[in-house]
Image (spheres, coloured by chain):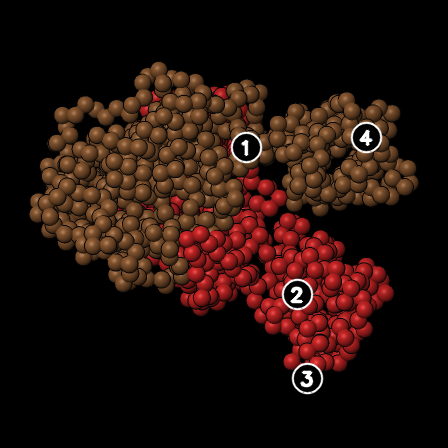
Chain colours: A red, B brown
């Protein structure tokens, strides 16, 4: 078990001048102390516009300062919200790489999707596309920091030409890439992106075990397409904490801060209406805490093993890791047994006094850390072979075009799409290999034209016209060719609308029978942030679609009504019908 | 005269692992030394994608580190390019405020417009709008840091609702606001925005005098509408420098670095084609320097007063402040006489050795700074009355609406067309007031969902689906409510395409009859640059559109074809048919 800290920089009202400076400087003193005492990591949160909850929104400056005060402690930037309207991924990547250079490595990122109204509204994030947006931000950031030369990005939310990041950073395995998980369901997403989990929802150890297993299962599965050049497979749990030899003193000094830490988060994420500059969150906490699950009265010193969440006398509260060293060791041991490899403690919640947080940190180092010193180094449960298999699924993007150059006034050509691995669907390369002379040229030209039409959203009309005027044989020969299908499936994958898919991830299998009796099997794998097409069958598809090759082309062109085709037996569906009925929406009009 | 440093973090090829860390750490050592020696300020440049020229793109991390190593030295972030595609102004402001809290004030910003292809192309900046964009970024940043509560921004490039910045920063007069001026003409812009000048084009003292006068004249004029709550009237000149008691040694140690500093800038700004990851700028410099104005051979030790730029034997070169302490004092005195109040020295250009830069800095402190110690503190030439007059022209924005609040899921009030007065359409407050219990709760939730869908472009599909599945009564109750209509009209206004309107200005009146027989009248006023929605009738509309309330919702959702509705009498049009037939184009799809 490793131990880390989370610094959110809470500052309950009322405020006096100089408070923020004192807060940040005391935080750095504890970071320096944590380094000396052998803790593993500090996370510095970047929350914006969240008065009283978090007054260190320029987290990179704090981390730069921390690099000067520490020698071994890992420096985590996050949770930090990623969205195209907040910051360009190259700015994020440059910050990480500079921090790495300053501190000689030891840098992590905990990315978060835009969630709270404070940031979503403040930065004008479009909630409807927030998920694919942050995933693109993260993937691009990771590619900028990866060993391969960055060849540009051509996504929905990030488009940029080739550029070299300077400083370059260490390239791999740092920075570690994590996802700040606000809900258990986020664990699956972290797994699909090959990210470590920073769990903020305060699971009990027994709950955590379930999500650790889910995280590992996804990391091991085909669904994991890693963002980074390395897998971060850690599972860390955030816990408000205070340690004192006397349990009652631990509670007296730490419980209000622990409760405010969680209450302030709920204020911004769940129930609070907030007037910028005037809402007094501490006052509301003081008056309403008992009603919303932070009952002070039921937290008592009883020497019992710690529950993280407390239910007593019909009231709910939070206990966290507030107690004696023995109690915290016992709790941490249960997390270790659950497979959690890091506890990220919040020692400075609310108005907790700096000197009490310092004493708590020292006691933690003296009496809690040693209890785990003899443990083997935390393993994240992935074998080297599993790690390699996951990394083999990574899509580092196309190679950098060695001829690409930009000039002082050039805005640079937009890069070709990094996207799917459906094989070359470049319009210019289309057309059948068979045939010769003018006929072949004509056919090839038609193929080029049609494929270009497919490849370009606006060309749908030309594609439809071609399909309407063609018989089965012509359709199979042109668009039903291997290249033609590659183009159609690549286009489908590119058109996949994660928003319309409403969280669905899984495989769609297409079994397309030609006039020759041969079945062409393709798979479209839908993920949270996009889809990829594969020229093979994958196990356990969510839906299998069977139809004739020419009919598939008609369907793709919008010239065959899928409902009618189903009724008349031209199309056969197996699997999850709820998914099948959404296919149209999920793939736009193609 | 004050003396500062500019750290751009140059790193000429070839590179070896660890170079970037060493570069940044040595830079911090010199910053700490400059603090001890009594220099005034350090500027840390944030240049992106400019290999060999600048390897510290995460400047905020460097500045955070510098805050730990200094006590008095002012910390300047910049030059840093501002553009909406790079970073949200609240992220910039949060960085500055955090740095202020860490260092107890003493923070400056040197903003730069997007100029080089490396950044313009890399970040996808639109050159056509780069100027208004960066000015809006700067003004919004300054307003977020100003003493008044921030009441939101409603510009072309920055739109955001009220939010409070945390940390708040000192509010005024820090941070100092400067403009990195690449050309003499930029001085006027700096003056118009009430910014100090950081002149990078290496003017001779005699040229500088002219531009100092221009800067002051603009600051004193009506043209100056300050961005910040204080005026920064300083005029600083960047100079490559090296000081040694022996002139020839100064040249040997410092001139190549001085030349590379300027050459690398020219490479990216003026003449270089750059292949990311492969172009060798140092090699090109070594081979071509003589041809492009950086002749090494004509820089000789002659004991003469320093020209910044050198012409000899028909060749051009750069001398900068490379010479003996006596020569540098004489040059600085001429700048002081010209009204320049700060020299910003580049001591670490190109491959200049760290220990030589350190020795140069120590000699500067020992023999150059004392020559100016007896001078009166630099005055920027503005009287208190002139300063007050300029600040009276500042536009701090409208007062914060004390009733404004955001919720956990709110994205802020639904966008009104610029300047619209369509009333509050906050999704969180949607749904009719009538009704009670489960029905009302369900209706409220549906209202929230639908209005959010309308408010977000990508949600159009969900909106259509909802409309398709709803009967008249449901449509009238949800979207036909006053709040619902406010959202629909606000969205229409926001979607107005002035280009498609082809110069049309005037009012569109909508008369929407509900099942209750009541007609809701709304007006959309089209102007050349946008449209606003109003909950009333305006005289002399260009077009009047009459239809049922539920049908209007269907029309807005794209679920009712306007042509068919007109033919079947469900929709009635009066007025200018030429305008009416363009309505679809003018408002996109809604």
- Give the chain letter at badge 4: B
Q: Residue at x 50, y 37 (%)?
A: B132
The numbered disc on residue A452 is: 2
Residue picked out by circle 3: A436
Task: Give the percent coordinates (x, y) of residue A547.
Answer: 76, 69
- Give the chain letter at badge 1: B
Task: Identify the element where label 3 is drawn.
Answer: loop
Residue A16: image quadrant is top left
Task: Pick the residue in front: B1 or A74.
Answer: B1
Is circle 1 on the same chain as circle 2?
Answer: no
Q: Residue at x 28, y 40 (%)?
A: B203
Task: Give the percent coordinates (x, y) of residue B97.
Answer: 37, 32
Residue picked out by circle 4: B544
Q: CA distance from mark 4 to mark 3?
A: 63 Å
Task: Pick the residue in front: A345 or B158.
Answer: B158
Task: Give the percent coordinates (x, y) of residue B553.
Answer: 78, 36
Q: CA distance from mark 2 to mark 3?
A: 22 Å
Q: Residue at x 73, y 43 (%)?
A: B585
Name the residue furthest top: B385
Quarter placement of the C terminus of chain A: bottom right
Task: Identify the element where label 4 is drawn.
Answer: strand
């Amino acid at each position: 078990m490793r131990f880390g800290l989370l610094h959110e920089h809470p500052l309950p009202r009322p405020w006096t001048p100089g408070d923020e400076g004192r807060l940040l400087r005391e935080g750095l003193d504890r970071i320096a102390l944590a380094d000396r005492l052998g803790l593993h990591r500090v996370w510095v949160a970047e929350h914006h516009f969240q008065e009283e909850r978090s007054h260190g929104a320029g987290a990179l400056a704090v981390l730069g300062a921390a690099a000067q005060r520490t020698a071994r402690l890992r420096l985590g930037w996050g949770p930090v919200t990623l969205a195209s309207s907040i910051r360009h991924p190259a700015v994020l990547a440059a910050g990480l790489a500079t921090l790495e250079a300053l501190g000689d490595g030891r840098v992590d990122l905990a990315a978060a999707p835009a969630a709270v109204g404070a940031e979503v509204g403040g930065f004008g994030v479009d909630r409807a596309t927030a998920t694919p947006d942050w995933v693109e931000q993260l993937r691009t950031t990771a590619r900028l920091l990866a060993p391969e030369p960055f060849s540009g990005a051509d996504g929905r939310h990030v488009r940029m030409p080739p550029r070299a990041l300077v400083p370059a950073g260490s390239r791999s395995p740092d920075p570690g890439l994590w996802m700040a998980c606000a809900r258990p369901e986020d664990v699956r997403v972290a797994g699909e992106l090959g990210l470590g989990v920073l769990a903020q929802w305060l699971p009990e150890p027994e709950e955590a075990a379930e999500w650790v297993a889910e995280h590992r299962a996804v990391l091991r599965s085909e669904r994991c397409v890693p963002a980074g050049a390395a897998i971060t497979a850690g599972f860390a749990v955030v816990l408000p904490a205070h340690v004192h030899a006397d349990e009652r003193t631990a509670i007296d000094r730490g419980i209000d801060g622990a409760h405010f830490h969680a209450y302030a988060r709920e204020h911004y994420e769940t129930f609070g209406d907030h007037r910028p500059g005037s809402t007094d969150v501490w006052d509301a906490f003081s008056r309403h805490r008992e009603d919303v699950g932070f009952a002070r009265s039921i937290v008592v010193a009883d020497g019992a093993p710690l529950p993280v969440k407390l239910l007593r006398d019909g009231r709910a509260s939070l206990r966290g890791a507030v107690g004696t060293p023995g109690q915290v060791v016992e709790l941490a041991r249960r997390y270790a047994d659950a497979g959690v490899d890091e506890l990220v403690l919040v020692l400075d919640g609310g108005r907790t006094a700096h000197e009490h947080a310092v004493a708590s940190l020292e006691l933690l180092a003296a009496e809690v850390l040693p209890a785990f010193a003899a443990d083997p180094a935390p393993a994240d449960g992935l074998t080297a072979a599993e790690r390699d298999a996951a990394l083999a699924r990574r899509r580092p993007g196309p190679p950098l075009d060695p001829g690409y150059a930009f000039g002082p006034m050039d805005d640079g050509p937009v890069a070709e799409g990094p996207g799917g691995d459906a094989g070359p669907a470049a319009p210019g390369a289309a057309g059948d290999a068979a045939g010769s002379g003018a006929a072949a040229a004509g056919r090839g030209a038609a193929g080029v034209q049609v494929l270009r039409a497919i490849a370009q959203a606006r060309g749908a009309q030309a594609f439809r016209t071609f399909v309407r005027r063609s018989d089965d044989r012509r359709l199979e020969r042109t668009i039903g060719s291997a290249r033609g299908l590659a183009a159609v499936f690549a286009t489908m994958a590119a058109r996949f609308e994660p928003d319309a898919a409403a969280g669905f991830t899984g495989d769609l299998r297409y079994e397309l029978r030609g006039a020759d009796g041969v079945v062409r099997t393709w798979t479209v794998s839908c993920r949270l942030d996009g889809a990829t097409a594969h020229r093979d069958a994958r196990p356990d598809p969510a839906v299998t679609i069977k139809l004739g090759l020419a009919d598939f082309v008609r369907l793709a062109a919008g010239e065959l009504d899928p409902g009618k085709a189903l009724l008349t037996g031209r199309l056969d569906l197996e699997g999850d019908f709820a998914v099948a009925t959404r296919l149209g929406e999920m793939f736009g009009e193609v």
